[in-house]
Amino acid sequence: MHTCAKRFMMAAILLASPLWSQEVHHTDNANLLARFSYENSATQQENADRRVCMAVSRAGDYRILRLRDDGQTVLREGKMQAEQFKQLQDLLSASEFRALSGSHGGVIRSEAESFSAEISRVGDKAQRVQLLNADGGNPFPGSVNKIVDWLEHFQVKNGNSLDEAESADVCPSVGLRLLQPRVATNKQ
């Protein structure tokens, strides 16, 4: 019975995942341009980011949260340089990114990466995109890879530190989260 319950739960998650892939929602912050989250369960290099979340305003102000592989959390805020902001705007307006639909789900056997975005498009409506690349089986589209690369290489210039209380709305409000049970990190 326990195995049957696990299979049922996995089937329910996989069947529901297309419902999460792209939706239109209302956002409370009219000044918000976008929120992003990228998470990778695989350890790539020392001091790498396991998760990066960023909220960007229409004026180029940002708040960023980086969860390092060693467990350290870095929270910063500031104003983007004009070139950085223009690059982000170009990535968000790319037709390939704007046309994203569907779901990239799958069964995770060893590692996965997820991408979530909430982008204000018209007035107070937001487009939400959520993708999962399980074990490299469903690579992200090129437009998403460009945004992930931009996020990973974003350099904080003249930013200020934030405390955890100020970081509540940095990540997209709804999103896929990679959960890793304690047993998965047991190296016996």
Image (cartoon, helix red, strand yellow):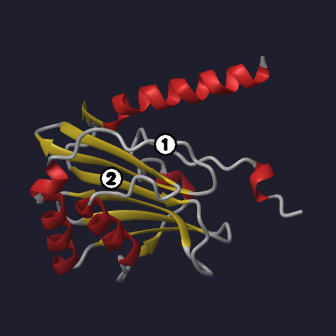
State the CA–CA distance, disc 2 to disc 1: 24 Å
Residue 81 circle label: none
The residue wearing badge 2 is: 35
Q: Which residue is drawn at 14% across and 45% down?
A: 121
Q: Can residue 78 be seen in this view?
A: no
Amino acid carrying mark 1 in the image: Gly
Q: Which residue is drawn at 27% across and 72% down?
A: 79
Question: Crowding near pointer 2: few (<14 within 10 Å), some, many (20+)?
Answer: many
Q: Residue at x 35, y 83 (%)?
A: 157
User: What SS does tag 1 mark?
Assistant: loop
Q: In this view, does 176 lie above or below 52?
A: above
Residue 106 circle label: 1
| Dot 2 or dot 1, earlier in sequence | 2
> Is residue 36 left or right of 127 when viewed as pictured?
right
Q: Position of residue 38 (x, y in %)?
A: 43, 58
Q: Where is residue 126 in the image (x, y as percent from the top left)?
A: 22, 39
Q: Quadrant of residue 90?
A: bottom left
Q: Which of marks 2 and 1 is in front?
A: 1
Q: Where is residue 162 in the image (x, y as percent from the top left)?
A: 49, 65
> Which image quadrant: the C terminus?
bottom right
Q: Is residue 4 above or below residue 34?
A: above
> Which image quadrant: the N terminus?
top right
- Give the camera-side residue of 75 and 147: 147
> Is residue 37 left or right of 60 when viewed as pictured?
right
Question: Crowding near pointer 1: few (<14 within 10 Å), some, many (20+)?
Answer: some
Q: How many labels does the image show?
A: 2
Q: Which residue is drawn at 61% across and 70% down?
A: 43
Q: Position of residue 178 (x, y in %)?
A: 56, 49
Q: Is residue 33 visible?
A: yes
